[in-house]
């Protein structure tokens, strides 16, 4: 057992509050197993804090930019500290939605039709006819996602609604169901269906109790369930992920089952909050939360 673990959380991204919840949950679980845990709220003093506490392993509980996109992973590599989740290149690839989408397509995985566009051009009516989805190029947890279902919905968008740069990813809207799959190492642990009580599975819905229903295992056709696991594992391997990841899929069963899956993205650092999906999927697989985070710590590594 690695005795000294630094849990890195918080940071400065828009997902800071969720990261703090994840980090505290991880700290409590690891401490219960006898690890010596130091909680670090990541800021510009992070290198000095790590040098001071000299951990054997870093548990990276950051979400969003800097923490998920390869930046902080590069710091851990320079310091030579093994860390949880994916490495520098994989993290950067997964966070860049258009690049990841191209790699998935090249690997034969079906993704929604889409392209990168100028935000002003989208507001001007260029590109897709509704319904479509507009996303930031490099945010997580559905931050900034707009689903445009009709022309009136489209006209409600303004520059004031958007704080994520001039370029956006616009994709064809896929009807159907939200299916998420957890991967641990080389194993697909299971698939869960999420049904938002509102119209969409957005940031607020993901992290507010009572905003969505979870169905584990996902109540879909057996062949479709097996296919979801296969897609998620192939996506994990395509990007070179290690540790734990979560694949986000849309399942279009509007013409009956088995339906058609569309891979939306891979999350290389899924949440570890009480409402997060990976711990719920792992529990159904037979791994409780402390066992899950301990596995992640004991399988931490550097790329170089």
Image: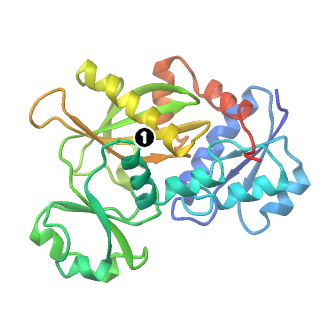
Q: How is the image coloured?
A: rainbow
Instruction: Tell whether 115 sits left or right of 64.
Output: left
Quick check: 41 above or below 31? below
Q: Residue at x 85, y 45 (%)?
A: 55
Please say whether residue 83 is visible from this viewpoint. Answer: yes
Question: Which image quarter is the N terminus in?
Answer: top right
Q: Residue at x 28, y 82 (%)?
A: 120
Q: Position of residue 70 (x, y in %)?
A: 63, 58
To which quarter of the image does residue 177 belong?
top left
Q: Position of residue 154 (x, y in %)?
A: 17, 72
Which is nearer the eye, 258 or 49? 258
Quick check: 242 above or below 168? above
Q: Which residue is mark 1?
A: 247
Q: Residue at x 19, y 32 (%)?
A: 259
Instruction: Tell whether 232 sits left or right of 197.
Output: right
Please say whether residue 275 is visible from this viewpoint. Answer: no
Q: Position of residue 67 (x, y in %)?
A: 62, 57
Assess disc 1: are there few (<14), some (14-19) or many (≥20) residues with their C-alpha within 10 Å of its C-alpha. Answer: many
To which quarter of the image does residue 129 belong?
bottom left
Q: How many marks?
A: 1
- Label 1 residue SS: strand
Quick check: 261 above or below 70? above
Which is nearer the eye, 101 or 161? 101
């Amino acid at each position: 057992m690695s005795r000294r673990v630094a849990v890195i959380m918080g940071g400065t991204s828009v997902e800071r509050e969720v990261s703090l919840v994840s980090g505290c949950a991880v700290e409590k679980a690891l401490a219960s197993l006898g690890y010596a845990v130091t909680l670090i709220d990541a800021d510009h003093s992070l290198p000095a804090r790590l040098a001071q506490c000299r951990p054997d392993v870093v548990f990276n509980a950051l979400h969003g930019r800097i923490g998920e996109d390869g930046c902080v992973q590069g710091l851990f590599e320079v310091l030579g500290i093994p860390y949880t989740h994916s490495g520098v290149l994989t993290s950067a690839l997964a966070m860049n939605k258009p690049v990841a989408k191209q790699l998935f397509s090249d690997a034969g995985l079906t993704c929604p039709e889409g392209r990168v566009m100028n935000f002003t051009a989208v507001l001007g009516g260029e590109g897709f006819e509704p319904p479509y989805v507009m996303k930031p190029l490099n945010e997580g947890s559905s931050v900034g996602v707009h689903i445009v279902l009709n022309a009136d919905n489209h006209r409600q968008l303004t520059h004031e609604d958007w704080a994520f740069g001039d370029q956006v990813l616009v994709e064809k809207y896929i009807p159907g169901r939200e299916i998420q799959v957890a991967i641990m190492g080389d194993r697909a642990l299971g698939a869960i269906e999420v049904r938002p009580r509102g119209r969409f599975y957005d940031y607020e819905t993901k992290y507010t109790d009572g905003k969505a229903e979870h169905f584990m295992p996902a109540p879909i056709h057996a062949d479709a369930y097996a296919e979801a696991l296969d897609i998620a594992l192939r996506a994990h391997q395509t990007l070179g992920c290690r540790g734990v990841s979560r694949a986000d899929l849309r399942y279009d069963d509007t013409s009956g089952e088995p339906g058609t899956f569309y891979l939306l993205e891979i999350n290389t650092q899924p949440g570890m909050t009480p409402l997060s999906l990976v711990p719920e999927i792992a529990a159904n697989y037979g791994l409780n939360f402390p066992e899950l985070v301990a596995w992640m710590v004991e399988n931490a590594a550097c790329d170089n």
